[in-house]
Image (tube, rainbow, N blue to C red):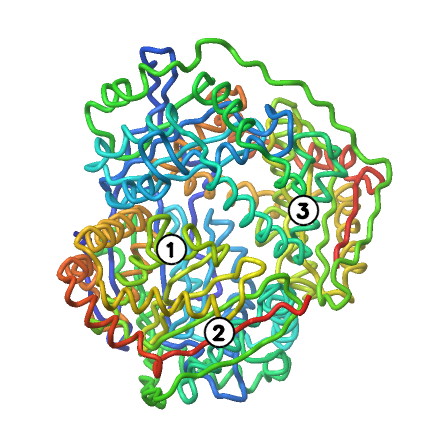
Amino acid sequence: MLNRKEAPPIVDTVNLNLQLKHAEKFTLDNGVDVYAVNAGAQEVIMIELVFFAGNSYEEKNIVAATTNFMLKNGTKNKTAFAINEHFELYGSYLNRNCYNETATLTLHTLTKHLHNVLPTMEELLMESIFPEDELAIYKQNQKQRLAVNLKKCDFIANRLIDEYLYGIQHPYGKYTSTIDYDKIEREELITFYEKFYKKGNCILFVAGKLPTNIQQQLNNVFGKLPFNKKQINQPTHHAQPSIEKKYNIINDANGVQGSIRIARPFPNRHHEDFMKAQVLNNIFGGFFGSRLMANIREDKGYTYGIHSYLQNHIQQSAWMISTEAGRDVCKPTINEVYKEMKLLQTKLIDAEELDLVRNYMIGGLLGDLDGPFQIIARWKTYVLNNLTEAYFYNSINTIKTVTAEELQELAKKYFNEEAFYELTVV
Amino acid sequence: MIEYNRFILENGLRVLVHEDNSTPMAVVNIMYNVGARDEMPNKTGFAHLFEHLMFGGSINIPEYDEPLQRAGGDNNAYTTNDITNYYCTLPAENIETAFWLESDRMLSLAFSEKSLDVQRKVVCEEFKEHYINKPYGDVWHKMRALAYKVHPYKWMTIGKELSHIENATIEEVKAFFAKHYCPANAILVVAGKVKTEDIKNLAEKWFGVIPSGIKYNRNIPKEPQQTEARFLEVKANVPLDAIIKTWHIEARLQKGYYVADIITEILGGGGSSRLFQSLVKEQKIFSNLDCYHFGTIEEGLLTIEGKLVKGIKMEDAEKAINNELQKFIDEPATETELTKAKNKTESVIAFEDMSVMSRAGSLALYELLGDANLINTELSKYNSITVEDVKEYSKKIFNTTNSNTIHYYSNN
């Protein structure tokens, strides 16, 4: 007779031997580094060019993001329509994204079409012309999008909490206004493009089912371009965190929920506390079984979801708690968050809970390494944060060995209510 | 080609196994043949609320999530108008944990009042977060009610109104479980680093003894053919005017479904699509414009929606869309446009198939549709579509009498 009350035996995932698949590194003729992961069963490939052209490098708000966006909006010989049609005809997706330090151009395509679309990527990087009429459409549509977003309490909350943490002048703290769109000019985009793309600093990441001549294909297209001729240094920015810690904002008098953000500054990945903090964060609010979820969603039903995380920044980070809660239970929600912090400071995490989180994290890591795009994403994080694969093995070791005492010390060091910014936007 | 083995337990539970040794993980996916379309008009949102309750403990296991997390696993679920799907991924070594958990909650739930009480609140917050506290959040509530007069697609999965969720009782929860959550109405797909023989044994061991239940015979009223254009005007506290238009299309396995899918690609599937190029870029009437459909199992809706550039009049925007559709009927798709749509479809399928979880979910859905092997024949169905098919079907669906339109005005 089957005993359904008893769990089947399991292998402790902490005993599994996790390996990060090696990324092959090679260098193009112009000195551009390429990291490549050849894996997967489907005949697909991803190629990402990472430029040091994020908003940390701009002198005027949204120049970096606008330049990045408009890479697809016209070259000497192709209109925006022709560019889009070319990639779409081959079932390929060309995306661009602008971050704080970096800005990317990313291609996803069936491997068999790679040779058809690669040369057009080169064209965008060397011959973009940023047409006035395309810029005008972009400004108008972005302003309209912003007007809609400004009606959402979560959007407002995300902007403001970053402003409190870093200051409005800092790349991590600044945000966009309608006036910024009005002020942007074509010449500024061209200047930024010349400096940070055409003659910029670049790293390539490729993954998927790679053709045997991938190195040669990439070198033929990108190896002759004038990248990495000189080192571009990142301007220094100092955070100017807000003095005032607590904020209540009414964005919509009829709102039925409040967006709550509670956050404090935290050092970057190179700090000795960072890995341990990831474990503490998981217990606190990092997954479905976390204490914040168990208490505030699964016991009290104040919210559809509550999460905590360490911001994914290179220079400095922040420890963030984020939730949307019923308008009448915002205050009790905030109180419960602090109560959970206090509990982690005063009471040792018991072995059962800590074991569960260790296993969950290692199992999650195993799943995260499943597939070429996931593997290269990890490598990209290490390269851009100036880490090596040792970071991966050290993280695993931390997950396996960190003690309840160490986590309590960490909670005492960081989970102090007075260190946190606290914001509710209705 | 996605390979799989298929067998049926004596109690009627259908089991599919897809072996893939390239991953260290296993996926256990259970799809129940019940969705929002199976709800009563005065108790909407129930299928989705019930999905939440499936995590509130089962007859022998007080906590669903904890043992799974301890085994290094993770899980989630979703409810649509058509189906409810539960899936977990975990290191393949620990797959039996998923069998234990999933079979126990198919056997019976704990039916805890506390869990019902909390999840009613959680789902109400979910409702508020996505449909009340968002600009344009009510668009689809209104559009479904406009486009469907009889068929239960006229309400959303989240439910028609908060009170339906707030009033759910534990008796209703029990009755719903008894009716829909049993081997006769479920499909189990196991994928990843597994062997079919082992899965057979595990399936027998954990699911084999669960009583079959009564096979659910869906008896949903068919939506009558729409015979005149429908309009609705809305005024709300939003910054921009918007238009949303829908047309009825054929059911999931009909040819018209595939043609409609291609039509949405040609009209709105990217930066070189017709509507985007003409209405956003050239005429500057909309600041964004989308064309899509929901992929429903029964007769669905093809949608065009966009926000108007400030200063553009609603009737001019409406006219501009209709002109484009007329043009699409008069000067049908070119071979290039059709090739583009087919190549994108091929690419989308390849990228989706990278994930073993996505493959497992697709297998379950195709099995529910009647034949798991549809997973391997989809692409050829798209590839057989001709320019003529697109022309004929466009003419048929983009008929005014088949259209539903909402003019959503900003009152700012």
| Comparing labels 1 and 3, the label whose residue is closer to the camera | 1
Name the quadrant of the C terminus of chain A: bottom right
Q: What separation in Å lies between label 1 and label 3 (alpha carbons)? A: 35 Å
* Tag 2 subunit: B
Residue at 22% from the left image edge and 59% from the top image edge: B333
Q: What separation in Å lies between label 2 and label 3 (alpha carbons)? A: 28 Å
Q: Secondary structure at mark 2?
A: loop
Numbered tag placed on residue B157 in the rendering: 2
Report which residue position mark 1 lands on.
B278
Q: Amino acid at mark 3?
A: Asn
| Residue B231 x, y percent position in the rendering | 48, 81
| Residue A414 x, y percent position in the rendering | 76, 35
* Tag 1 subunit: B
* Tag 3 subunit: A
State the residue in front, A216 or A5: A216
Q: Secondary structure at mark 3?
A: helix
Instruction: Confirm whether circles 2 and 3 share one chain.
Output: no
Vertical comparison of A238 with B149: above or below: above
> Given the current orientation, which residue lies at the most extreme top position?
A230
| Comparing labels 1 and 2, the label whose residue is closer to the camera | 1
Q: Amino acid at mark 1?
A: Ser
Q: Are marks 1 and 3 in contact (CB under 8 Å)?
A: no
Residue at 27% from the left image edge and 41% from the top image edge: A86
Q: Amino acid at mark 2?
A: Thr
| Comparing labels 2 and 3, the label whose residue is closer to the camera | 3
| Residue A230 x, y percent position in the rendering | 48, 9
Give the class, few, some or many, for how many residues have Cα within 10 Å of label 3's Cα (few <14, many ≥20). some
Q: Secondary structure at mark 1?
A: helix
Report which residue position mark 3 lands on.
A158
